[in-house]
Amino acid sequence: MGTGTLHIDLDALAANWRTLDARTGCETAAVVKADGYGLGVASAAKALAQAGARRFFVATAEEGATLRKALGDGPEINVFSGHMATDTDPIRDARLTPMLNDAVQLARHRAALPDAPYGIQLDSGMNRLGMEPADWAALRAEAEAGPLTLVMSHLACADEPDHPHNTEQLRQFTEMTAGVTVPRSLSATGGILLGPAYHFDLTRPGIGLYGGLPFAEAAPVVRLSLPVIQLREVAPGEHVGYGCTFTATRPTRIATLSAGYADGLIRAMSGKARLFAGDTPCPLAGRVSMDLLTVDVTDLPEIPEVLDILCPAQTVDDLAEAAGTIGYEILTSLGPRYARRYTGRAA
Ligand SMILES: *Cc1c(COP(=O)(O)O)cnc(C)c1O
């Protein structure tokens, strides 16, 4: 194998959905945007549907059309970006439910597809998507006159439980949705963990399903194994990689692995991330390049065929911290070159 292998445990994915579902007394949807957070939307969504998810969320209508092919009829597919000018065909053909974000989208949807269901996204203080209180006050009667299925908003700071913006958004959302008779949804993964006041009728977890923070008890879903292409001995004083940023201080054994920043292992990890042979860490030596990593394996008694960069000893969030980013970005950057190998019931 010339490329790495991304092992995806669909049983762990399903277990994470069930654990988050058990945290609330309401319905639990599943967010599978960005190709199921980089893991492959068809397999991820089928496993989540088997676990019991009946409503899915994606970012765009194009993603929704792809998801509909994978899931078939039945599950509801909601689109965060709403109804854009070019979305009428996919919304109709794939039976998608757009989350309408403003007056233009509401008018467009009602005119183009008068009988097609829709949700409304409200802005409760994030200032990213959705109707602001004044827009909503003006549009609410019209919105409630059609086949409205959901009213939702999104929290900006849910991964910081003590952030005062959480209670402020909760207050704003509660006020804006007083008297609404359709299901209401405020929380993604972080909001589920904030407690029952944030749950309303439906939650929308994403990252927690895939094993990422802020869901600290999540079962790990991914393992990323990279093949060793070449081994070499480097004498004290010799350098490794672009810019000669690593200099051997002892007789050093360097393994060259097949993956690099083109595969989402960003250059900012240079000198910080580690590779694992079982539980034994091996530091990166020198800079991450486009297709290759160089790793100091001097302390390994035996060199395995592959080393892991994501595994229980170095989680998605550990790797994110080494790279100065968040687990979401690590997962969604994992490139198309890896062989994605699914294990578990839905595989
Ligand atoms: C991405 C997203 C989610 C899922 O968030 P996680 O933090 O991954 O659980 C839910 N709702 C909206 C509006 C989103 O954009």
Image (tube, grey):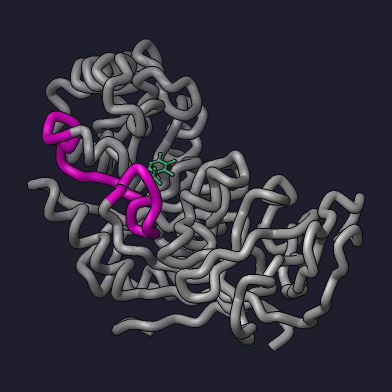
Foreground residue among 136 and 171: 171
Point out residue 133 in the picture as x, y percentages from the top left corner: 34, 14
Which residue is rendered at x = 69% and y = 59% of the image? 284
Point out residue 54 in the picture as x, y percentages from the top left corner: 24, 62
Q: Is residue 211 above or below residue 320?
A: below
Which residue is rendered at x = 71% and y = 66% of the image? 295
Q: Residue furthest left?
A: 25
**Magenta-span inclusion, residue 208:** yes
**Magenta-span inclusion, residue 161:** no
Say left or right for 186 vs 222. left
Question: Which quadrant contains ligand 1?
Answer: top left
Secondary structure predominantly adopted by residues drawn in magenta:
loop
Point out residue 309 in the picture as x, y percentages from the top left corner: 57, 65
- Quadrant of the rendered image containing residue 106: top left
Point out residue 294 in the picture as x, y percentages from the top left corner: 76, 66
Q: Is residue 117 above or below residue 161?
A: below
Q: Is residue 139 above or below residue 226?
A: above
Foreground residue among 328 and 40: 328
Q: Is residue 215 above or below residue 42?
A: above
Which residue is rendered at x = 71% and y = 45% of the image? 268
Residue 176 visible to an observer of this rendering: no
Quadrant in which the N terminus appears: bottom right
Q: Residue furthest top?
A: 134
Which residue is rendered at x = 48% and y = 45% of the image? 112
Residue 190 visible to an observer of this rendering: yes
Foreground residue among 313 and 108: 313
Say left or right for 45 vs 297. left
Q: Which residues are magenta?
A: 195-216
Say left or right for 67 vs 267. left
Quadrant in which the C terminus appears: bottom left
Q: How many marks?
A: 0
